[in-house]
Amino acid sequence: MATLNRLATADDRAAQRGEHILAADQVGKLIELLVRRGYEVVGPTVRDGAIVYDHLESPDDLPRGWTDEQKPGHYRLHRRDDEALFGYVVGPQSWKKYTHPAEVRLWAAERQNGTFRILNNEEKGQHPRAFLGARACELAAIAVQDRVLLEDKYRDPVYDRRRGGAFIIAVQCTQAAETCFCASMGTGPQVSDEFDLALTELLDSKGHRFLLAAASDRGTEILSELKTVPATEEDRQQAAAKVDAAARQQVRSIDTTGIKELLYENFEHRRWDDVAGRCLTCANCTMVCPTCFCTSVEDVSDISGDHAERWRRWDSCFTQNFSYIHGGSVRTSAKARYRQWMTHKLASWIDQFGSSGCVGCGRCITWCPVGIDITEEVRAIREGGRNGDS
Ligand code: SF4
Ligand code: SF4
């Protein structure tokens, strides 16, 4: 009896926190409720051999029964032996696709009656989006970009507009890829409370279902319209065990102890030459990184000179032009560019924005064509002694 009382109390607490069980066949209803509130629902879907983020009409668009295999320079999709909707880790895209898009037309202008008229600025009046399937490391990445693009000295209006109304449905990781190291960066796999709703997928003899939690008023409102039952202590423990297992599965890590000083003191470490011998300066790592934010601005006009546009495009510290200043590039070698990228991510980012620029998602490892591994590079610098002299 005493045990039953204890369980009942824990279950009540779970219900108060908004933890419920949602049957898998109710995910369609969740999408429907979001659409009815004016959101465009975007999330994971299979395209061109990868799981990418795109518009979702229904649960049929989700990667049901698919999983991803990731290693340095390697990504493959495989069929699972179950019908999991979120049984993969992360793909090449991140939510910056929507909040900080690769290309934005900042303005266009047309010559009319001897003067230029501004036609329009970046798209206005688009639907707010609901991000379905954001992982813990991705929430951490969004928080990093919030600090850079909203909370620093300059507020980016494009990011502000796109980020402002976003409704976030987090999905806890219940498996890790070989390239994940969020546990060592303190960014996952457990989601923080920076979400509206959070799902943990459970699939066993008791059926296909989700532990569902709400962390905002609008999340609680949606939850109240879904057909759910209060989660039991057993459900919660099962979900927590799955997330713990994803942390334990991680084979990569970065020791972040004194990492800023480590990198600042090893500017001339011989490992930079070693990695430069492998790096193609292709910029893939910066394109897939959910926190990288650098852009360049390009003005274009038509041949008549009557129509002009200003575009903002993702740029990368791996291109030579990126550091072009008055007649020349500051970082002409692959060594200088790789060192700049990694030192900024893991050291000077802390001075600039108060946190690491890396959330441990592993994308730069998976999508590097030659499999350069940031965790291995940090380890080599740490173990090599000052400037690699030992
Ligand atoms: S540096 Fe690599 S592991 Fe870190 S957040 Fe960027 S892509 Fe992910
Ligand atoms: S580290 Fe890899 S992905 Fe990044 S620029 Fe070099 S070769 Fe390309």
Image (cartoon, rainbow, N blue to C red):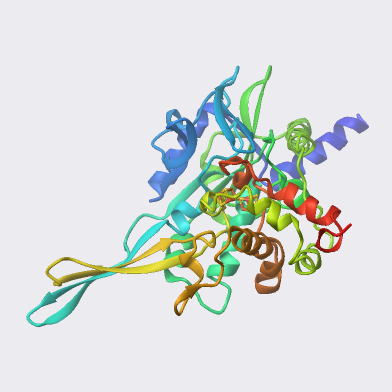
Counting the numbered discs, the total is 0
Residue drawn at x 62%, y 34% as measured from the top left: 70
Dividing the picture into quadrants, the one containing residue 141 is: bottom right
Left or right, 163 with reference to 126: right
> Is residue 165 shown to the viewer in this render?
no
Position above or below: 75 against 264: above
For the point 74% across and 33% down, the residue is 242
Which residue is most to the right? 2
Left or right placement of residue 56 versus residue 290 in this view: left
Looking at the rendering, in which quadrant would you find the N terminus? top right
Along the line of sight, the residue nearer the viewer: 123 or 348: 348
Residue 162: x %, y % from top left: 44, 60
Position of the C terminus, as image quadrant, is bottom right
Residue at the spot 54% in from the left edge and 34% down from the top edge = 227
Compared to 339, does 228 lie above or below? above
User: Foreground: 260 or 132?
Assistant: 260
Residue 125 x/y as whole percent: 32, 61
Where 131 falls versus 247 (above or below)?
below
From the viewer's side, name the closer residue of 179 and 320.
Answer: 320
| Residue at the (36%, 54%) spot, across then down | 127
**Percent coordinates x, y for residue 267 in the rendering:** 74, 67
Judged left or right of residue 29, residue 364 is right
Note whether residue 223 is visible: yes
